[in-house]
């Protein structure tokens, strides 16, 4: 593999072997994955061989070794030229994403109530394996409404306010959801989990705006210095994982009929326009809507906890998905084409003026929410004109050490003590889960975001630091 | 930590967790295909739950359909994850027996209410670099689990 530096923030892997397009890695030299410990660049090359891929197989600055696709990968296929869709290019946790709520109070006003608020969140936010969900969905029929209409349905039945939907991608419900393509097993897994965080790297953090880089954009997003915010990071729970597993199996069985071979079974795919491709797109949209309803219900639970301890309102800044595939129109080689854009651990970043943005955000671009590592910093970014990789940017810090390695280097108890000593209240589910998410297991989120900005993928709007962590 | 060669020489069963930045990678080994699959179940459960204080709730049996060895392993582990999400139970001991269609999974179930969470909860079994194969004197497997 030959990697050529095209600029300080852009590297190119020339096509060889079965690659149909080059690999393009947006990274600084320091952030380039070390091939001895991380196979993500090999995965960028595998993705470059997918049928119908156009322009390049992209890697974001936070790229790391995933399964099939790299985590932090973007790939678009031309759906009118037999371009494929791959469930592995979306990931198991369909529409895993982030939402940010801005509170009507500043840090000093919250600090006296922080412990009580954190205890309330600890009690009311379901997570880990015992949790269930905050919403007791009445049965299959109601779950079908969730799958069809996502956060829109949740708001319609009283779990939010109309303005929330203006600040969700696709108005809270992606079109094309087909609950009939969601298996009975997926439905069973999803029934009891609407309004739950899960575990692993998922979290709810109470944060404070530490720095503003772009005042106009911050104002449009409703953010100001020292303001309290809440960031929620979670996805489509067992339902989304089951959808991915089911459709990977179906596509794997169908690939030979389409003459497709892949170097990794988790890259199983089928033409987006094939029966298998359309079935997955319908199921994926349903799981995406489930994830948006999930984050909407956690928003409601958070608002209730705040209401018990403060008088502050919580307004939704934005809700983004960073594991999803979307049908989008982009110009490729001088022609407008319908593309299936896979973002696996990558975030869409629409530029100012994009017609999909609500009028109040159109002048500044789409808010992009980057959850940092526990106890460090998170970022609010905005889309920019001419953004690369089909208007995509990073999604987080990106792991450099496995959970296993993280465990050997730090104890959960010590990490909690260190965070508490820095004024960060921690409510975890297990010491081990805490240790596995130690900041030392991840890339430096400041470096990742600076690189994404330097590469022209986005611009910085605000930096947020945690004062309370509810760990999934 | 057992050396890798232990997997191909030891007749008894065992398991370990190996580094992978994408969640959890398990290796398990055993004298037969079925014992190896059962050991993978132990590895999966042991990665996130301490069942010492969990109450037994009965024996469960599930038929697993698979046309290849690796698909059998995935189906067995998938069944445990599905059972956790829907019945809120985990196996304290599992046994896998071959059937013409695949395998029968039989396990002593415990209620997760009494289980202690010690790690992130598995959500799916990936096909990435999946291996389940015979060795000189037994079977070994290697599987990546999404958490």
Image (cartoon, rainbow, N blue to C red):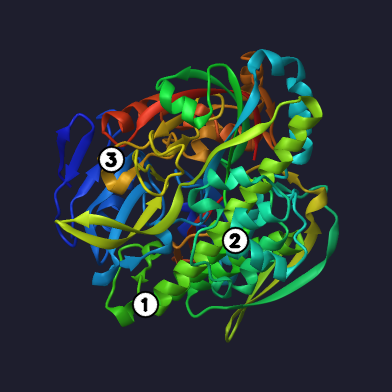
The answer to whether tags 2 and 3 share a subunit is: yes
CA gap between label 2 and label 1 equals 25 Å
Chain letter of the residue beneath label 3 in the structure image = A
Q: Is residue A326 visible?
A: yes
Q: Closer to the camera: disc 2 or disc 1?
A: 2
Chain letter of the residue beneath label 2 in the structure image = A
Judged from the image, the secondary structure of the residue bearing numbered disc 1 is: loop
- Relative to residue A16, is residue A2 depicted above or below? above
Q: Closer to the camera: disc 2 or disc 3?
A: 2
The answer to whether tags 1 and 3 share a subunit is: yes
Could you tell whether A207 is left or right of A57 in the image?
Answer: right
Q: Earlier in the sequence, mark 2 or mark 3?
A: 2
Q: Residue A46: where, in percent of width, then height?
A: 27, 57
Could you tell whether A239 is left or right of A193 in the image?
Answer: left
Q: Earlier in the sequence, mark 2 or mark 1?
A: 2
Circle 1 sits on which residue?
Answer: A274
Could you tell whether A270 is left or right of A297 in the image?
Answer: left
In the image, A437 versus B72, the foreground residue is: A437
Could you tell whether A350 is left or right of A41 in the image?
Answer: right
Circle 3 sits on which residue?
Answer: A387
Circle 2 sits on which residue?
Answer: A149
How many C-alpha atoms fall within 10 Å of the one at disc 2: few (<14), some, or many (≥20)?
Answer: many
Q: Disc 2 vs disc 1: Cβ atoms closer than 8 Å?
A: no
In the image, A428 versus A121, the foreground residue is: A121
In the image, B63 versus B27, the foreground residue is: B63
Q: Residue furthest bottom?
A: B100
């Amino acid at each position: 593999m030959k990697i050529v530096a095209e600029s300080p923030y852009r590297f190119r892997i020339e096509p060889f072997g079965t690659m149909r397009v080059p690999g393009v890695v947006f990274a600084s030299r320091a952030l380039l994955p070390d091939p001895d410990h991380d196979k993500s660049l090999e995965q960028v090359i595998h993705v470059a061989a997918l049928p119908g891929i156009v322009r390049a197989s992209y890697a974001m600055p936070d790229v790391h070794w995933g399964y099939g696709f790299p985590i932090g990968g973007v790939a678009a296929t031309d759906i009118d030229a037999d371009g494929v869709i791959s469930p592995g290019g979306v990931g198991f946790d369909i529409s895993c994403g982030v939402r940010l709520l801005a509170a009507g109070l500043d840090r000093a006003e919250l600090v006296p109530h922080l412990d009580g608020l954190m205890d309330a969140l600890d009690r009311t936010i379901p997570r880990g394996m015992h949790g269930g969900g905050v919403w007791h969905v009445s049965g299959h029929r109601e779950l079908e409404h969730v799958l069809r209409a996502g956060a829109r349905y949740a708001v319609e039945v009283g779990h939010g306010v109309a303005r929330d939907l203006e600040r969700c991608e696709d108005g809270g419900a992606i079109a094309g959801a087909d609950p009939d393509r969601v298996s009975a097993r997926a439905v069973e897994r999803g029934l009891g989990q609407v309004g739950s965080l899960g575990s692993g790297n998922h979290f709810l953090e109470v944060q404070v705006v530490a720095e503003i880089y772009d005042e106009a954009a911050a104002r449009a997003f409703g953010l100001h210095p020292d303001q309290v915010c809440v960031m929620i990071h979670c996805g489509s729970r067992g339902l989304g994982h089951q959808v991915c597993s089911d459709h990977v199996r179906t596509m794997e069985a169908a690939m030979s009929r389409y003459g497709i071979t892949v170097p990794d079974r988790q890259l199983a795919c089928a033409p987006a326009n094939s029966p298998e491709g359309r079935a997955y797109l319908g199921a994926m949209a349903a799981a995406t809507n489930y994830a948006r309803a999930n984050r909407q219900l956690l928003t409601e639970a958070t608002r209730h906890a705040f209401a018990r301890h403060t008088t502050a309102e919580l307004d939704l800044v934005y809700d983004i998905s960073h594991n999803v595939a979307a049908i989008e129109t982009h110009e490729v080689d001088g022609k407008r084409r319908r593309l299936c854009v896979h973002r696996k651990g990558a975030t869409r970043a629409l530029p100012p003026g994009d017609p999909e943005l609500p009028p109040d955000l159109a002048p500044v671009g789409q808010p992009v929410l980057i959850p940092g590592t526990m106890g460090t910093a998170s970022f609010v970014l905005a889309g920019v004109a001419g953004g690369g990789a089909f208007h995509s940017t990073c999604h987080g810090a990106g792991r450099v050490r496995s959970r296993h390695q993280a465990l050997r280097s730090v104890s959960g108890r010590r990490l909690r003590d260190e965070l508490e000593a820095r004024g960060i209240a921690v409510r975890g589910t297990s010491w081990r889960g805490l240790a596995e998410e130690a900041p030392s297991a991840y890339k430096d989120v400041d470096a990742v975001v600076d690189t994404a900005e330097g590469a022209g993928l986005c611009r910085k709007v605000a930096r947020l630091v945690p004062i309370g962590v509810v760990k999934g | 930590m057992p050396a890798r060669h232990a997997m191909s020489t030891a007749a008894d069963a065992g398991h370990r967790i190996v580094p992978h930045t994408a969640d959890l990678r398990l290796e398990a080994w055993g004298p037969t295909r079925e014992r190896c699959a059962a050991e993978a179940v132990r590895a999966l459960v042991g990665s996130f739950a301490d069942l010492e204080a969990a109450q037994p709730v009965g024996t469960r049996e599930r038929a697993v359909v698979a046309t290849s060895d690796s698909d059998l392993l995935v189906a067995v582990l998938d069944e445990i994850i599905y059972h956790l999400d829907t019945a809120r139970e985990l196996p304290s001991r599992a046994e896998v027996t071959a059937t013409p269609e695949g395998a029968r999974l039989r396990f002593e179930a415990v209620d997760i209410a009494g289980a202690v969470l010690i790690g992130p909860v598995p959500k799916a079994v990936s096909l990435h670099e999946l291996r389940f194969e015979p060795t000189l004197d037994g079977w070994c497997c290697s599987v990546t689990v999404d958490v």
